[in-house]
Structures are given as structure tokens and as C-alpha cells.
Image (cartoon, grey):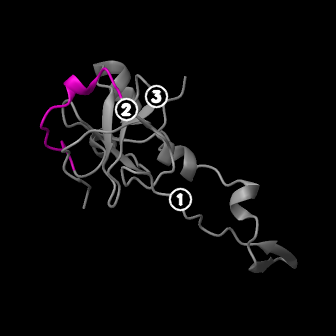
């Protein structure tokens, strides 16, 4: 089973619905093609801009600890010279790992090896929390907004 946050899933696909209604066209090698316009995602009552539904109850909230990020990038990618797409912060130990759109998928690998299910987005402007065990967005009150620099 693939573990992926809704943000990564959203960023990894462009559907006809997302590009429908685009009025601009681009000519490439003589072909007229529509350009993909960024979609504005609705904000829910929690203020998260991913357009997903929040799960109101998660049995793993007792695992949330006051953590400090282990690195300003994916800890494991930095160690081996890898690259990442987006970062996730483990809310149990502070491990910073890369998302499932990244080649090595270190955040979900950390969940499988350490059993720490809750991650917070470590991207600027994002403050959602994902539970790998429940495969759901979770509302966690009082978390500081954090991101890499």
C-alpha cells in the first residue's frame, strides 16, 4: 500500500477537470496546446488549503510530542546526497523526511520502521497533519506552523 499525503497526490496529477476552461494556448512544434492553469483549492473550516476532509478523531494523537526538526531538509536524503520534493515532520520524534512524491519516500519509510504515524507538513504555508495509520488528515490543535527555510 502506498502512503501519500493528499497534497502529494494532488501535486502528482493533472486531470481534464483541472485544465478545462483554460483559455490560453501554447504552440509547441506547430501544435496548439492548452497550458495547464493552477487550480485554486478550497479552504475548509480548519484553514487547510488541500481540499480534503478532516478526520475528527484519531487514536494516535497521544503520540504527539513537542519536537524540534531533525534537519532543514530530508535527514536521510542529506546523508546520502539524495533529492526530495516536499518535506514532512514526524510529530513523535522530529524526524524530517521526504514525501511519497520524492524518489526515496523517507517519511513513509520512517512510519513503517519507527511506527510514528503522525506527520506535519514541513512546507512553507502549509499546516496540515497526516496520519499514515488511518490514511487521513487529522486536526491537531495548538501545533506551531513550521517549515524548512
Q: Is 102 or 22 nearer to us in this picture? A: 22
Magenta residues, start to end? 57-71
Is residue 101 visible in the rendered image? The answer is no
Pointer 2 residue: 56
Residue drawn at the location 34% of the way across and 55% of the way down:
123
Is residue 22 visible in the rendered image? The answer is yes
- Please provide percent x and percent y for residue 73: 28, 50
Pointer 3 residue: 135
Q: Earlier in the sequence, mark 3 or mark 2?
A: 2
Pointer 1 residue: 41
Residue drawn at the location 26% of the way across and 56% of the way down:
148
Q: Is 104 or 81 nearer to us in this picture? A: 104
Which quadrant would residue 116 be assigned to in this image? top left
Foreground mark, 1 or 3, reads 1
- Please provide percent x and percent y for residue 6: 50, 43
Q: Is residue 31 magenta?
A: no
How far apart marks 1 and 3 lie (CA) works out to 20 Å
Q: Main secondary structure of the magenta part?
A: loop
Q: Is 116 or 70 nearer to us in this picture? A: 116
Secondary element under disc 2, as helix, strand or loop, is loop
Tell whether 18 sits left or right of 134: right
Label 3 near label 1: C-beta < 8 Å?
no
- Please provide percent x and percent y for residue 47: 37, 55
Amino acid at each position: 500500500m502506498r502512503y501519500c499525503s493528499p497534497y502529494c497526490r494532488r501535486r502528482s496529477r493533472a486531470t481534464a477537470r483541472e485544465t478545462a476552461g483554460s483559455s490560453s494556448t501554447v504552440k509547441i512544434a506547430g501544435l496548439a496546446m492548452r497550458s495547464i492553469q493552477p487550480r485554486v483549492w478550497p479552504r475548509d473550516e480548519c484553514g487547510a488549503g488541500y481540499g480534503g476532509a478532516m478526520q475528527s478523531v484519531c487514536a494516535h494523537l497521544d503520540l504527539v510530542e513537542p519536537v524540534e526538526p531533525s534537519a532543514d531538509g530530508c535527514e536521510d536524503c542529506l546523508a546520502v546526497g539524495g533529492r526530495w520534493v516536499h518535506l514532512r515532520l514526524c510529530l513523535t520524534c522530529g524526524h524530517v523526511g521526504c514525501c511519497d512524491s520524492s524518489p526515496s519516500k523517507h517519511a513513509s519509510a520512517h512510519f513503517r520502521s519507527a511506527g510514528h504515524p503522525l506527520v506535519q507538513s514541513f512546507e512553507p504555508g502549509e499546516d496540515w497533519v497526516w496520519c499514515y495509520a488511518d490514511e487521513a488528515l487529522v486536526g491537531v490543535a495548538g501545533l506551531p506552523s513550521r517549515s524548512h527555510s
